[in-house]
Image (tube, rainbow, N blue to C red):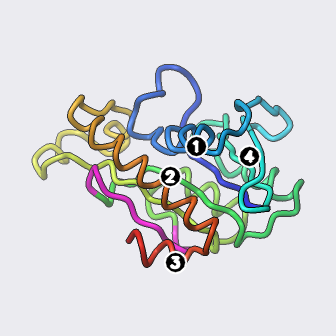
């Protein structure tokens, strides 16, 4: 069984923000896999849908705890379904990469991303797969004026939305490829 988690913040006002790229991609993945619509599961603090892909059960998850507590939902679901750390994929926005890029990693630290720090802390491990989606478009001057914590809650420009639509489609392809093959094959093909 695979657990694929998109990180983001619940609520309409956050829907199109940079910080919700994980939710946006998990929604695309749900449509691509033709899984049922997401259903709220309060005991997991998450919206979940599930189905089969390549003869394996796949859970798609959107935590509803807000970004900084995302790990609570991931840990509850992984424990309940007895999912190993190696079978968890997390999709999230990353200020270390430019808008229009994404990177696959097998494991690693959470950096300064509070959602990832929460997931690592709750799972007690950094050894899960991650799909890091670039959202950085600020110039060096803008970085001084527009702090990261505020920037991640801003919306993409219309030009950036077009770029992100392509990146999100590519990321969905990469996730499906990783599920069909393995994370190393996906890294070789998409990184």
Where's the C terminus, which quadrant?
bottom left
- Give x and y (percent) for residue 46: 73, 37
> Contact (CB < 8 A) between labels 1 and 2?
yes
The local secondary structure at tag 3 comes to helix
- Give x and y (percent) for residue 154: 33, 32
- The residue labelled by disc 4 is 73
Taking the magenta stretch, the answer to whether it contains residue 134 is no
The disc, 3 or 2, on the residue closer to the chain's N-terminal end is 2
Residue 94 to residue 124: above or below: above
- The residue labelled by disc 2 is 172
4 vs 1, front mark: 1
> Contact (CB < 8 A) between labels 2 and 4?
no
The local secondary structure at tag 4 comes to helix
Please give the range of residues in magenta.
98-109
Q: How far apart are marks 3 and 2 (CA)?
A: 15 Å
- The residue labelled by disc 3 is 185
Q: What is the number of the mark on residue 32?
A: 1
């Amino acid at each position: 069984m695979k657990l694929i988690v998109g990180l983001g913040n619940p609520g309409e006002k956050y829907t199109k923000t940079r910080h919700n790229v994980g939710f946006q991609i998990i929604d695309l993945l749900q449509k691509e896999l033709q899984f049922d619509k997401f259903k709220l599961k309060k005991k997991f603090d998450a919206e979940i849908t599930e189905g089969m892909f390549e003869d394996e059960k796949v859970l798609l998850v959107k935590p509803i705890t807000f970004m900084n507590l995302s790990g609570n939902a991931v840990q509850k679901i992984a424990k309940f379904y007895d999912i190993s750390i190696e079978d968890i994929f997390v999709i999230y926005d990353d200020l270390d990469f430019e808008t229009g890029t994404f990177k696959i990693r097998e494991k690693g630290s959470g950096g300064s991303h509070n959602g990832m720090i929460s997931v690592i802390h709750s799972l007690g491990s950094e050894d899960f797969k991650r799909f890091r989606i670039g959202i950085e478009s600020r110039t060096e001057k803008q970085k001084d004026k527009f702090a990261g914590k505020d920037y991640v809650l801003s919306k993409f420009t219309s030009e950036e939305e077009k770029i992100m639509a392509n990146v999100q489609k590519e990321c969905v392809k990469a996730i499906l490829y990783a599920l069909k093959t393995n994370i190393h094959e996906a890294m070789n093909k998409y990184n």
